[in-house]
Amino acid sequence: MFQPNNKYLIINDGDNITEKLKSALHKEGYRIFVSDEEQSNNSSKQSITINDLIIDRETYLVHFKGRKIIFPKKEFELLYLLASNPEKVFNRDVIAQKIWNKSKIEKGDRTLDVHIRMIRKKLNEEYITTIKGVGYKLIKS
């Protein structure tokens, strides 16, 4: 919730404020502070565990069936996005916007598919499923 207070703005985790908005507010003279509530919420969100898959955002490491796997940044961010909402189908354009800051994927662009294929390979084809004509989702079992 936004709480303007004499050119200060207190931001809670649920606000999902973007860096661009933070920058714009800063240019207008606001000082941005992260509330204690947001810091505690973020620390609990640093790691996602689903069965034998642990995704640690703080160290950018993935532990899968007892092995440590290092993912390139975009693969890691893509896996983290899917795991942050298991069973939710993310359409290709939403993924493009969240991972690559593109408004949509151009026809013929296979970047997303290649990243998904590499993640699947590292996770022995487990967890990520394709929803034809829509996008991808991470399954819990």
Image (cartoon, rainbow, N blue to C red):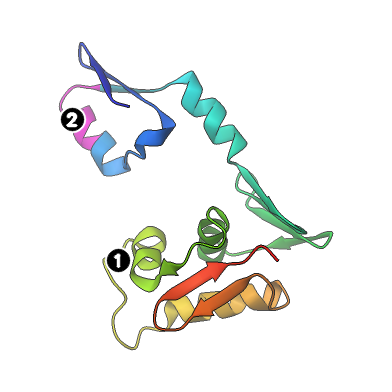
Q: Main secondary structure of the magenta part?
A: helix
Whether 85 is drawn above or below 134: the answer is above
**Helix, strand, or loop for circle 1?**
loop
Which of the marked residues, 1 or 2, is nearer the chain's N terminus?
Answer: 2
Amino acid tagged 2: Lys
Please identify the residue farthest to the bottom as the structure is shown: 108
Q: Is residue 28 magenta?
A: yes
- Residue at image position (20%, 16%) is 7
Tag 1–tag 2 contact (CB < 8 Å): no
Residue 121, given in percent of the width and then of the height, sits at 67, 78
Q: Nearest the camera: 75 or 81?
A: 81
Write down the quadrant of residue 64 in the picture: bottom right
Whether 109 is drawn above or below 49: the answer is below
Residue 75, given in percent of the width and then of the height, sits at 55, 66
Residue 110, given in percent of the width and then of the height, sits at 42, 84
- Residue at image position (51%, 81%) is 114
Write down the quadrant of residue 35 in the picture: top left
Residue 16, given in percent of the width and then of the height, sits at 36, 40
Q: Is residue 57 magenta?
A: no
Magenta-tinted stretch: 23-30
Is disc 2 surrounded by few (<14), some (14 to 19) or many (20+) residues within 10 Å?
few
Write down the quadrant of residue 21 in the picture: top left
- The quarter of the image holding the N terminus is top left
Q: Nearest the camera: 128 or 32?
A: 128
Residue under numbered circle 2 = 27
Q: Please give the count of numbered marks on the rendered protein.
A: 2
Left or right: 77 as drawn, with respect to 94 = right
Amino acid tagged 1: Lys
- The quarter of the image holding the C terminus is bottom right
Residue under numbered circle 1 = 102
